[in-house]
Amino acid sequence: MASNRLRAVNKEEGESAEMDMSPMIDMVFLLLLFFLVVSNPRTIKIDQDVQPPIASNGRPAKSVHGKIVVNIREDGLFLAEDTNLTFENKELLAEYIEEEKDKIKAVGNTPVLHIRADKRAEFKYCQRAIKAGAIAGVDQLAYGAYNKE
């Protein structure tokens, strides 16, 4: 008798227990859009003519935000990150660094002078770039180098 009741209960078909995935898909797209809008990816453009030195204890930068990149070629020519701006003396370089510093501070980041010098360039050129950064009021410095060959 109990088996007849059990069969009767199992015969009845109720609603299927399927899950509606459309809200889940909507949520995934919303999260994707949120992270695309919130993230601010930035890469440092490099000058192909500059070959940085090797530093065995070098470590990657924590953040690329706030970097004022100055490339120094072997002949002592200073170039901005976009390699269209060249500077022959440290006064012009200081003006450029100060303009970039003001832009970075306006966004709320800390400006960092990022020097990418050629390994064959004399250190006096790096000193000039550092002095230009000091004149512009930038007190943090990062020096670009490769970790290994």
Image (spheres, helix red, strand yellow):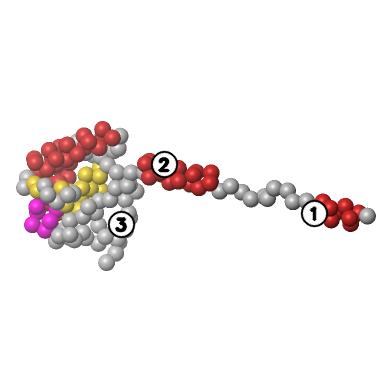
- For the N terminus, the image quarter is bottom right
Instruction: Name the residue carrying label 2.
Output: 34
Q: Give the class, few, some or many, for how many residues have Cα within 10 Å of label 2's Cα (few <14, many ≥20).
A: few
> Which of labels 1 and 2 is toward the front?
1
Could you tell me the amino acid type at mark 3? Gly
Q: Can I make out residue 137 in this image?
A: yes
Instruction: Please give the label number shown on residue 58.
Output: 3
Q: Please name the residue shown 45% across and 46% down the image.
A: 29
Q: Is residue 16 left or right of residue 41?
A: right
The boundaries of the magenta stretch are: 72-78
The correct choice, above or below, for 82 with respect to 121 in the image is above
Choose the circle earlier in sequence order: 3 or 2.
2
Kindly report the distance in space between the C-alpha atoms of the residues bearing marks 1 and 2: 47 Å
Choose the circle earlier in sequence order: 1 or 3.
1
Could you tell me the amino acid type at mark 2? Phe
Instruction: Please give the label number shown on residue 122.
Output: none
Could you tell me the amino acid type at mark 1? Asn
Instruction: Name the residue carrying label 1.
Output: 10
